[in-house]
Image (cartoon, grey):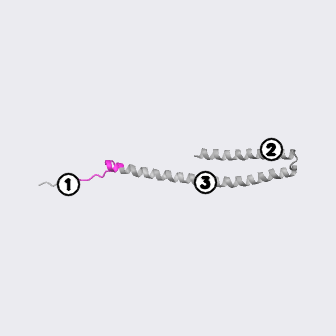
């Protein structure tokens, strides 16, 4: 499970990096075609990176919370299943007469 979460996080980071590169390329092309000024292009890229960084931190925090809750729930379920298994084992043992035995004294009355 932890491995899946890591892959998700790495994929997200890769996607942001890829998108940043594409935006930079588009802005460079617009500057080269004189459709926007170089200063406007820099501002667009800087704004995107600033927004992306803020969102990244927000997403990482939420992702961390979700992961922690998931792991806590898994631990709870494991403990619960362990207790349930122990109880089932005790039930089976008692039904088979394999539980703790108590020695009893037999009294025979002689006439």
Pointer 1 or 3: first along the chain: 3
Which circle marks residue 66 in the picture? 3
Residue 39: image location, x then y, percent: 87, 51
Highlighted range, magenta: 92-107
Q: Position of residue 68 (x, y in %)?
A: 59, 53
Mark 2 burial class by Cα count in 10 Å: few <14, some 14-19, many 20+: few
Which label is found at residue 107? 1
Residue in the picture at 49% in, 52% down:
79
Q: State how far apart marks 3 and 2 are (Cα).
A: 35 Å
Residue 99 visible to the viewer: no
Name the residue that disc number 2 marks: 25
Instruction: Say which of marks 3 and 2 sits in front.
Output: 2
Does residue 105 belong to the magenta stretch?
yes
N-terminal of the two: label 3 or label 2? 2
Looking at the rendered image, the disc whose residue lies closer to the viewer, 1 or 2, is 2
Answer above or below: position of 26 versus 54. above
């Amino acid at each position: 499970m932890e491995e899946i979460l890591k892959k998700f996080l790495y994929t997200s980071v890769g996607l942001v990096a890829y998108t940043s590169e594409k935006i930079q390329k588009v802005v460079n092309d617009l500057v080269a075609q004189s459709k926007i000024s170089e200063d406007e292009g820099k501002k667009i890229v800087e704004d995107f990176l600033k927004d992306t960084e803020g969102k990244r931190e927000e997403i990482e925090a939420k992702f961390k919370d979700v992961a922690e809750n998931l792991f806590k729930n898994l631990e709870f379920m494991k403990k619960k299943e362990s207790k349930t298994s122990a109880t089932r084992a005790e039930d089976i043992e008692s039904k088979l007469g394999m539980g703790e035995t108590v020695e009893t004294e037999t009294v025979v009355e002689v006439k």
